[in-house]
Amino acid sequence: MKTIEIDEELYHFIAGQTKHIGEDASSILRRLLKFNKPTSNKATPAPQTESNYSVIDELIKSERFTKERSTISRFLAVLGALYNYNPALFSIAATSLHGRKRQYLAKDEKSLETSGKNTNPREIIGTPYWVISNTNTARKILIIESIMSDMGISESMINQVIHAFSPSNN
């Protein structure tokens, strides 16, 4: 067994996911992250296939998304789809994502406002999260790429989403 340090918010999230009395943190995380039972000392994640990403794939191929001119609307839509794909993994990725001085995602507007000047927090509809929106498109793409990578989403799906933000697609 290894020991890790996590912040209070993440600890309470994990503890709140307990299904039965005595369930340990490893079991909760395995269930939330969809890890198979290890056959050796190393845990192996459940294989991800492109069909697992249907909520994300459907969004970026939808007419509503492709015709949307606003980068911020696309940004918010992708973040919402990532949350809907796997709320537990999104929560973990969102908690670990921040800049040197600035927090990018939070569960309340106030936290983002206090993490920097002119953050212009926007609610990610359908989720308990808010995100800063006054960043350039490149930073928005880095935020999405980081979250997707931390969620264990395949490189090919990450590239499809990034491609949806390229200037030729706007």
Image: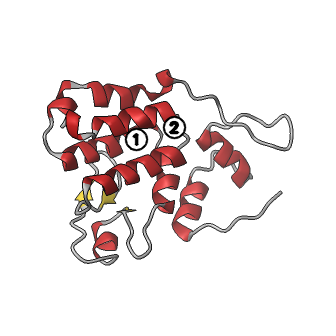
Position of residue 137 measured from the top left corner of the image (x, y, whole percent): 26, 52
Counting residues from the start of the chain, the first of labels 1 and 2 encountered is 1
Residue at the spot 76% in from the left edge and 64% down from the top edge? 3
Residue at the spot 57% in from the left edge and 29% down from the top edge? 48
Residue at the spot 52% in from the left edge and 54% down from the top edge? 92
Residue type beneath disc 1? Leu
Q: Quadrant of residue 8?
A: bottom right
Q: Which class describes the residues within 10 Å of circle 1: few (<14), some (14-19), or many (20+)?
A: many
The correct choice, above or below, for 72 with respect to 116 in the image is above
**Snapshot colouring:** secondary structure
What SS does tag 2 mark? loop
In the depicted view, which residue is nearer to us: 23 or 4?
A: 4
Q: Quadrant of residue 103?
A: bottom left
Q: Quadrant of the C terminus?
A: top left
Which residue, as the protein is rendered here, is positioned at the far front?
A: 168
For label 2, the residue is 153
Position of residue 123 measured from the top left corner of the image (x, y, whole percent): 25, 55
Position of residue 61 measured from the top left corner of the image (x, y, whole percent): 28, 25
Residue type beneath disc 2? Ile
Residue at the spot 54% in from the left edge and 24% down from the top edge? 49
Q: Quadrant of the N terminus?
A: bottom right
What SS does tag 1 mark? helix
For label 1, the residue is 82
The correct choice, above or below, for 136 with respect to 6 in the image is above
Locate residue 106 relative to residue 168 in the image: left or right: right
Which residue, as the protein is rendered here, is positioned at the far right?
A: 40
Q: Nearer the viewer, mark 1 or mark 2?
A: 2
Locate residue 85 relative to residue 113 in the image: left or right: right
